[in-house]
Image (tube, rainbow, N blue to C red):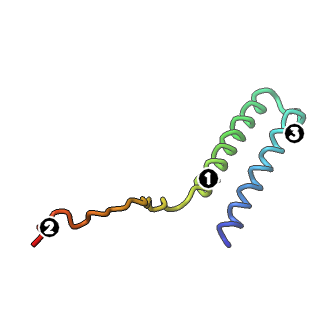
Amino acid sequence: MYDTINSMSKARTLLLLGIWVAVLPYLGFPSFWKSLLFSLTGLGMMYFSYILYLESRPKTTPKETFDNFSENNNFNETVQ
């Protein structure tokens, strides 16, 4: 349950960063500060999206099973 809450918190943070990017050009920051804030926001979005990607991957790899049929399993034994 904690993992779900934690990933929802990260998803919410990602959503808020997206809203921040949409609003940032209209806040009246000077060009230097606007560029710096866009860069920092982009790095934050990359970090949170990568963490969400890592959490969404399966923890273990499934064991591969093959449906092979072996009729002659005692092939090396000699007939007496």
Residue 12: % across, % down: 77, 56
For marks 2 and 3, give the CA distance. Answer: 78 Å
- At x 80% / y 50%, what residue is drawn? 16
- Reading the image, the residue beneath label 3 is 23
Q: Residue at x 56, y 59 (%)?
A: 58
Please give the label number shown on residue 34.
none
Give the labeled residue for mark 1.
51
N-terminal of the two: label 1 or label 3? 3
> Dot 2: what SS?
loop
Kind of residue indicated by mark 2:
Glu
65 sits left or right of 15 in the view: left
The label on residue 77 is: 2
What x and y, as percent, mark residue 6?
A: 68, 64
Element assignment for label 1: helix
From the viewer's perspective, is residue 67 above or below residue 24? Answer: below
Could you say which quadrant of the image residue 76 lies in? bottom left
> Which of marks 3 and 2 precedes in the sequence?
3
Please tell me which residue lies in front, 63 or 72.
Answer: 72
